[in-house]
Image: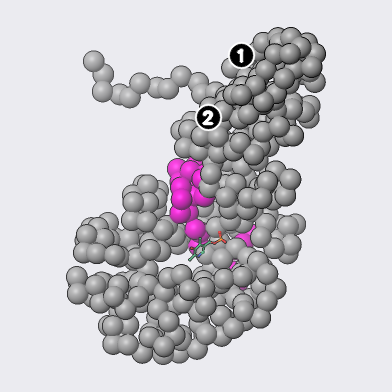
């Protein structure tokens, strides 16, 4: 018996990450980050698109700083870049986290005086520091900047996070000023503030390093980025089976669709477990070559049924496009572009 893993047969579901667009988006955001440089937020499996598909592209484009949220996310990124380039935003919660950080060489983001003391007590070493300038999520407050626990740290990046960078509000400048003020008393090498939307706020927000996530993957959080950012994601699924149904027959759970005439329908291999949520059911369509294939009945966990009237040539095995326009309010169905990306199911990334 061979130890080589058995290769998977062809999938009926695929996510295509447009590497050219992803690389171009990073380079554009990096250019807009001058006088600083751009890093990349790759948490949540690169916003649902897959670390293995995205991190090598970002690395080859020139990215040298990668941000994840959990310690469990470090290893998959470290398969592509040096661990020293990976920052963990949640920081160390306990000694096990500190030991893991040191064993791998990944850099913790310190978010509190407790985390600062823990990191120092377990041996210290280079870290980043999050300053909370108003989002009230993670980070030390400006009033804690003078604490001895902070003075004891070896801080590379002093960072803060904008709460409303996607809006034009006075809060953005207030946060930038609070960070600049704290930077005078906290010893550090580099300063970082802007996420994707923050980059569009201009050079005053770029500091030494920006941390775009959403816009890398095609999201447009501010109109200033619309002309620059290219779509990255494409989702397709195969027709598993075609069938003919007669007037009065129902489709799917609870027969939520009842045929009014003879129809040819196709069962497509994508469902809510893949992030194709049930609110994308009736009233929406899948697409083949510009032809709309309206969705019939409820979306199941692994399947959805479409009307093939517009595409009588389609048969089992054919691919259809599942619209995933993350900036389109109609397709968003009340979800944000962030949610549309991160709910892309794991089965799509396995191919
Ligand atoms: C997720 C995250 C980012 C990236 O934000 P986008 O809006 O996706 O560009 C940057 N910084 C921190 C601290 C984050 O948590």
Does residue 77 sit above or below 304 in this rendering? Answer: below
Tell me if the residue at label 2 has its CB under 8 Å from ligand 1: no
Looking at this view, is 263 or 323 the one in front? 263
Image position of 148 with respect to 139: above or below:
below
Q: Nearer the viewer, residue 29 or 165?
A: 165
Front in this rendered view, residue 251 or 6: 251
Disc 1 element: strand
105 left or right, relative to 327? left
Query: Which image quarter holds the N terminus?
Result: top left
Give the number of the disc on residue 47.
none
| Mark positioned earlier in the residue sequence (2 or 1) | 1
Q: Position of residue 188 (x, y in %)?
A: 40, 80
Separation of residues labelled 2 and 1 (CA atoms): 16 Å
Secondary structure found at label 2: loop
- Left or right: residue 55 versus residue 309 is left
Residue 49 is one of the magenta-drawn residues = yes
Looking at the rendering, the stretch of residues picked out in magenta corresponds to 28-55
Query: Percent x, y for residue 12?
Result: 55, 23
- Whether residue 342 appears in this view of the structure is yes
Asked whether residue 189 is in view, the answer is no
Q: Are marks 2 and 1 in contact (CB under 8 Å)?
A: no
Q: How many marks?
A: 2
Image vertical order of residue 341 relative to residue 239, above or below: below
Q: Identify the residue at horizontal 74%, vertical 34% (top origin).
A: 283
Q: Position of residue 37 (x, y in %)?
A: 54, 68
User: Horizontally, is 84 left or right of 124 in the view?
Assistant: right
Residue pointed to by mark 1: 241
**Which numbered disc, 2 or 1, marks the residue closer to the eye?**
2
Residue 301: which numbered mark, if any?
Answer: 2
């Amino acid at each position: 018996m061979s130890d080589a893993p058995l290769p998977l047969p062809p999938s009926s579901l695929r996510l295509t990450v447009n590497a050219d667009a992803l690389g171009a988006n990073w380079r554009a955001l990096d250019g807009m980050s001058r006088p600083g440089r751009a890093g990349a937020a790759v948490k949540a499996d690169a916003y649902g698109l897959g670390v293995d598909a995205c991190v090598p592209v970002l690395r080859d484009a020139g990215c040298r700083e990668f941000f994840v949220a959990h310690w469990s996310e470090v290893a998959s990124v470290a398969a592509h870049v040096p661990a020293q380039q990976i920052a963990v935003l949640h920081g160390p919660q306990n000694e096990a986290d500190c030991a893991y950080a040191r064993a791998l060489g990944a850099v913790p983001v310190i978010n509190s005086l407790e985390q600062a003391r823990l990191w120092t007590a377990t041996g210290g070493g280079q870290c980043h520091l999050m300053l909370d300038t108003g989002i009230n999520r993670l980070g030390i407050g400006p009033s804690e900047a003078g604490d001895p626990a902070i003075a004891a740290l070896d801080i590379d990046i002093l960072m803060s996070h904008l709460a409303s960078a996607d809006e034009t509000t006075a809060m953005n400048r207030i946060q930038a000023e609070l960070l600049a003020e704290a930077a005078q008393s906290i010893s550090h090498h580099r300063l970082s503030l802007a996420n994707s939307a923050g980059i569009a706020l201009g050079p005053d927000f770029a500091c030494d390093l920006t941390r775009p996530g959403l816009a890398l993957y095609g999201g447009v959080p501010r109109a200033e980025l619309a002309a620059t950012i290219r779509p990255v994601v494409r989702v397709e699924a195969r027709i598993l089976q075609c069938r003919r149904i007669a007037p009065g027959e129902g489709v799917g759970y609870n027969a939520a669709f009842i045929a009014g005439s003879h129809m040819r329908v196709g069962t497509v291999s994508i469902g809510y477990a893949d992030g194709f949520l049930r609110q994308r059911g009736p009233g929406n369509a899948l697409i083949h070559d510009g032809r709309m294939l309206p969705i019939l009945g409820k979306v199941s966990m692994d399947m959805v049924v479409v009307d093939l009237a517009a595409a009588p040539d389609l048969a089992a095995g054919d691919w259809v496009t599942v619209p995933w326009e993350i900036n389109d309010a109609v397709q968003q169905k009340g979800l944000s572009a962030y949610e549309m990306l991160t709910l892309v199911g794991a089965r799509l990334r396995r191919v």
